[in-house]
Amino acid sequence: MQQGMHPDLVRVVFTKEEIAVVVERIGRQISADYAGQKLLLVAVLKGAFVFMADLLRYIEGSVEVDFMAVSSYGAEAKSSGVVRIIKDLENSIEDRHVLIVEDILDSGLTLTYLLKNLRSRNPLSVEIATLLYKEGKQDVAIDCKYIGLACPNEFVVGYGLDYAERYRELPYIAVLKPSVYSA
């Protein structure tokens, strides 16, 4: 265990500093891609709120935010595969450019559901920005325009990611001990 690390964790995968560099890079890329256009960022709660807050600070131009809450995990370490909307968007997305901001692209089931749902609302475009991407883990193919970091196929927490509503406050991303979530 690394010094100063929470005792429930195995190791830090991405430091606060590494995350900041990646978030800035994605923000600058989004700014260039949407220059002169209005953009609506849609954070997938609860995990993506930290990423979106930091990302927003690096996007130049006209940006609005909204939030959706969906559930596919509950208090489990593995997605149930059943996605349900807990909180929907506040405003219409018709004729708008929409960027879904996600904390982690894992199985792809949640994002597949969200893409289908949001595209049915007639936006100009719908794209995805994810901080973490678990390579080879997707059950379905997802075209993700902005990818931050390749993530090991382990259960990670911190920087908004949680297990049973714990560890979101950590400024880094770390691997959770299997004994914590398999107990």
Image: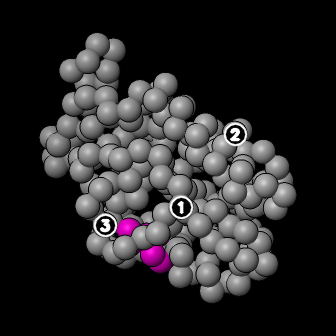
Q: Residue 6: give x, y in percent of width and height.
A: 31, 24
Nearer the N terminus, badge 3 or badge 1?
3
Q: Residue 55: give x, y in percent of width and height.
A: 63, 43
Q: Quadrant of the N terminus?
A: top left
Query: In front of the other: label 3 or label 1?
Result: 1
As shown in the figure, which amino acid type bears the numbered disc 2? Tyr
Image: 5 above or below 50 = above
**Separation of disc 3 and disc 1 at Cα?**
16 Å
Image: 16 above or below 85 = above
As shown in the figure, which amino acid type bears the numbered disc 3? Gln
Q: Nearer the viewer, residue 32 or 149?
A: 32
Q: Which residue is mark 2?
A: 58
Q: Residue 143: give x, y in percent of width and height.
A: 46, 69
Report helix, strand or loop for mark 3: loop
Q: Residue 15: give x, y in percent of width and height.
A: 41, 27
Q: Is residue 51 left or right of residue 12?
A: right
- In the image, is residue 110 part of the stretch drawn in magenta? yes
Q: Would you say the residues marked 3 and 1 are in contact, meaning their CB atoms lie under 8 Å apart?
A: no
Q: Nearer the viewer, residue 30 or 69?
A: 30
In the image, which disc is placed on residue 138?
3
